[in-house]
Amino acid sequence: MRGILPMGAEWARRGRPFAMATLVAVSGSAPREVGASMIVSADGDVFGNVSGGCVEGAVFEQCLLAIRSGTASVETFGYSSAAAFSVGLSCGGVVEVLVRPVLPGSAAAADVLLLAEREARAMPASYTLTVAGADVGRGVIDQTSPPSSGAVTIALGSPPRLIIVGAVEFAVALSRIAIAAGMQVTVVDPREVFATTARFPGAEVVVAWPHRYLETAEVDARTAVCVLTHDPKFDVPVLRVALASAAGYVGVMGSRRTHEERLERLERLTDASAPAAATVPAEQLERLRSPIGLDLGGRSPEETALSILAEIIADRHGASGRRLSELSGPVHRPLGARVAS
């Protein structure tokens, strides 16, 4: 849903009638997760999607019907259904899609405007949608009571975060593709000449010593820290902080020889008078991804950035990073499932 909110809010502000289709249930293999949404205007403009192209045509028609009728419905598409081949759902899964009208001045339009505002400010929100019963299609933002069995709650406003240390050329490419992938990106470097918003459009740019910044930054399991500086005076202090933090991913660029030298620095005291805590425990060092990225064979900044982002995504989902052709089972695994390496 996150991806369609800016356009949906624009349509709502202009008083443009449209319908929103939201994926509310998935079983078996399906290309999108619950919450994926598309919007269709009364004159046929489309933005977003609820599958990999499998059911969009049928959903489009349901959206136009919802605008005309003013009523919401839940549609089911599955490989075993009579319409499976006509809608192109050949992945073997079953999906349920809530289709509801978003008309000028309606509560649904007000919800879209508020959710878009909170998303733009990266403010966490939950949106509970009723998918059964007389109130099907009703939405509640930040519902305080437990949702009923006929409702689905979608978390919004808190995209995965990427903190890039070092405003180098590889960082420019990584920032660009991470933003395109829906991540909230922060670039940290004490050198003002390199750390500029012009080089990193769409990212938060912080001119500061990286380890000082990271000591006070909000970091959780959905945060990835990528150190791309190639300079021990930046790398070692920030890695000490990052590896001790709650960050779900910590990676650093460099050759295997550089990696070994860096490990030696992380394992020993910074100076004779430093406290024992200055060393990095072995269990923390095991979290370090170095050399950073997956083995894709590329060398350009863009290809390298792609390999780094691929490793971050694989780590986040507990996936192996192997070729899908070498694995068995569904291509799209249930949320929380992991693939053994």
Image (cartoon, rainbow, N blue to C red):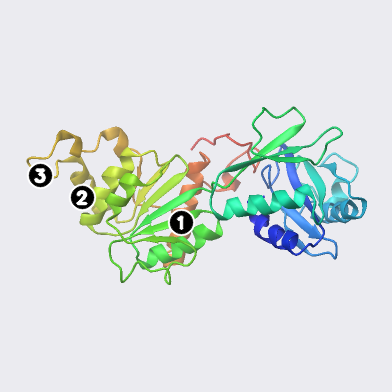
Q: CA distance from mark 2 to mark 1?
A: 29 Å
Amino acid type of the residue tagged 3 in the rendering? Asp
Q: Is residue 81 visible?
A: yes
Q: CA distance from mark 3 to mark 1?
A: 34 Å
Which residue: 29% across, 43% down? 241
Q: Earlier in the sequence, mark 3 or mark 2?
A: 2
Residue behind mark 2:
261
Give the foreground label among 2 and 1: 1
CB-based contact (under 8 Å), mark 3 and mark 1: no
Amino acid type of the residue tagged 2 in the rendering? Glu
Q: Is residue 264 above or below residue 189?
A: above
For residue 326, which numbered disc appears in the image?
A: none
**Secondary structure beneath disc 1?**
strand
Residue behind mark 3:
271
Q: Quadrant location of residue 175?
A: bottom left
Q: Is residue 91 visible?
A: no
Q: Earlier in the sequence, mark 3 or mark 1?
A: 1
Q: Nearer the viewer, residue 9 or 258?
A: 9
Residue 35: x and y in percent read: 68, 44
Residue 315: x and y in percent read: 47, 43
Which residue: 68% across, 47% down? 32
Q: Nearer the viewer, residue 189 or 50?
A: 189
Residue behind mark 1:
185
Give the foreground label among 3 and 1: 1
**Secondary structure beneath disc 3?**
loop
Circle 2 packing at 10 Å, graded few (<14), some (14-19), many (20+), is few
Q: Is residue 319 above or below residue 182?
A: above
